[in-house]
Amino acid sequence: MKINKKKLTQLLTVALMLSTATVNAEVSPTEEFSFDKVVVTAQRKETKELETPASTTIITGQELKDSGALSVFDALERTVGVHSYSYGTAGQEYGSMFSRVMVRGLDKGTLVLVNGAPVNLMNYNTMGVIPVEAVDRIEIVKGSNAVLYGAEAMGGVINIITKKAAGESSGSVSTTYGNYYKDNSVTINDKDFMFFYKKEIRNEVDDLNRLFTTSFDKLSLGKGNKESLFLNLNLTDELSFNYSYSNNESNFKKWKYNSVDKNYTTLVSNSIYYDKRNNVNLVYDNKDIAVKSVLAYNSINLKGAGNASTTDYDLYGINFDNQKTWKLRNGQDSLVAGLTLQRENYEKESSKKFHRDSYALYGSYNRQMSENLVATLGLREHFVKANSYDESQNILLPQLQTLYKIDDQTSWYTNIGKSFEMPATSSPFYMAKVSTALKLKPQEGWTYETGIKHINGNESFKVALFAMEIDNKFKWVKEDTVIPGGDPNSSIQINNDKFRNKGIELEYNKRLNDSWQYNLGASFSDPESKNGNGNWAQDEAKLQLSAGATYTEKKIMTNLDFFYLGKRQMAYYNMEGKNTSQDHRIGDRIDMNATVQYKATDRDSFTLSGYNLLDRGNPINPTEYWSTPINYRLTYTRTL
């Protein structure tokens, strides 16, 4: 869609300036403010951030709304220490090429949970099934957490906690219009029932990738649509049911350069993808007896049409987890222990099926060593059953954490843990000749971390130093490089690489007064993996900077957000559009977004959000796909 970028920039700038105007109306009461938020993911029990021996970041549902986050993915990739890989803005995916986020630069080593249950499939932590409007909070715990959560929790764990029905009967309707996007949604809420539905329509994005030469195909994103649904039922005081569903249709087109038109006007292919996802979890949480059980089901069904290269397939995962917490020594100590059962299933073309079963026992003992010192020892015994592809695995995972309270506002922690990850369940079907001959080992390794947290009523400062060492890192290579006579066009997964990273992360948040609040973040790291020659090569960006400010005055809220990603790795294609050699680095990513909310009446509100305000061609992955050009969204919401 063609837009006047100059006028759009002026419109958004004027809106931001007007947002500082005073409006004679009272704001509704808000909950008591605190930077020392409660964390439940890091130790499987409620602890304050200051008392948690790990690097943690909490994003509340209100913060998601204020920032104008387009999706859960969009919010996460702007978090200090979190990198991303996508094929378009806000986690756009390209058929079976899934987007994902990665903590501390380790690709396919971040575990995403929904209400405490894993949603990763094929080593990908896709989260497009959860609408951002259904999120109550997101907890990000960096560092190894495999003792409590199992496979894939190598770089960190991200727990998406959905909203629960509460309060009196209420509802709202909302409509959004933008130059690349529009939607309509409805929310219904009661004491024990919450329902949300949204229909999205996406317009065309003409330039999706970097064009190196006229022989390189141009990729564009055609019109698409998506339906999202979220349902929460409080069946009893202890038992709740949550269901999320998404049905996404996307369209990608490839164009060749036409020497007569001197433009990309020759359509080469038109690929259409139909992507359906389900996430179901039943949560029993009895705080009186300190027992929590979660039964979860997660699935992806993908079909292709037109020129889509994707073969239809179905994925699903079933997970059951039961934990119990005991208070010991008159409440000074605690023990969390539990059992996890899991099945992962992959089915392709109805004739190729594969599943993996695993189960685990885990425990974490929290000991009050002195008035100021607490130590936590965790152990997990993880079993993976043998099948036609995997050998059986019996993996012991230890973890040791300490936390020392320097004073009431400052703590120092250490966190050392071992983690692992199994090969993707789809791996056997990419191997034409070595699917049974080549047995992959889990990738596994250690993370070492120490940090200081200082949190008081109006500010918080957190710094973390970390080092990661991973062995048997998975790598995809051409089959003919592994065995004589192998297919040069088939990529297979092998154990070949090592991965390492070390760095420092800093976060600072300051609340100046009831109106102003700002945040600063920085990450400096050195993620590397071994290449085919045995040499170390940069694996991800080394530098990440972020800054944001929020202003609230009566009926108006304004948020400005800045994000920078620099010192990036080598690009996949060279300047001739070939992957035979590397000759340049991925360009810096510089994003600036802004959101203005205006509450016109007690029932009516308007939100104007602007994205990529600098209108940069930001490369968002190593193959240099672009983020969406400067764009806006205007939303009207009516409370019923």
Image (cartoon, rainbow, N blue to C red):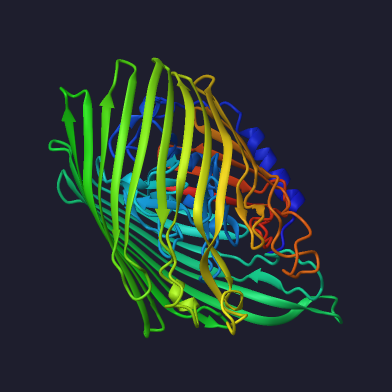
Comparing 528 with 516, the one in front is 528
Q: Residue furthest left?
A: 289
Picture quarter containing residue 276? Answer: bottom left
**Is 35 on the left or on the right of 309, as rendered?**
left
Residue 570 locus on image (x, y percent): 71, 56
Q: Identify the image quadrant of residue 298.
A: bottom left
Q: Nearer the viewer, residue 457 or 98?
A: 98
- Taking the spot 57% from the left edge, 40% from the top edge, the residue there is 502
Q: Closer to the camera, 213 or 639?
A: 213
The relative height of residue 174 versus residue 19 in the rendered view (above or below) is below
The residue closer to the viewer here, 105 or 532, is: 532
The residue located at (55%, 39%) in the rendering is 80
Report the quarter where the N terminus lies.
bottom right
From the viewer's perspective, is residue 518 above or below residue 148? above
Residue 43: x and y in percent read 32, 37
Q: Is residue 570 left or right of residue 86?
A: right
Query: Is residue 484 visible in the rendered structure shown here?
Result: yes
Q: Is residue 71 visible?
A: no
Instruction: Report the residue at 43% width, 62% height from top.
Output: 441
Identify the residue at image location x=38%, y=44%: 145
Give the total of numbered labels. Answer: 0
| Vertical position of residue 614 compared to residue 19: above or below | below
Residue 457, position as x, y percentages in the image: 44, 18
Position of residue 521 measured from the top left corner of the image (x, y, whole percent): 58, 33
Q: Is residue 445 above or below residue 142?
A: below
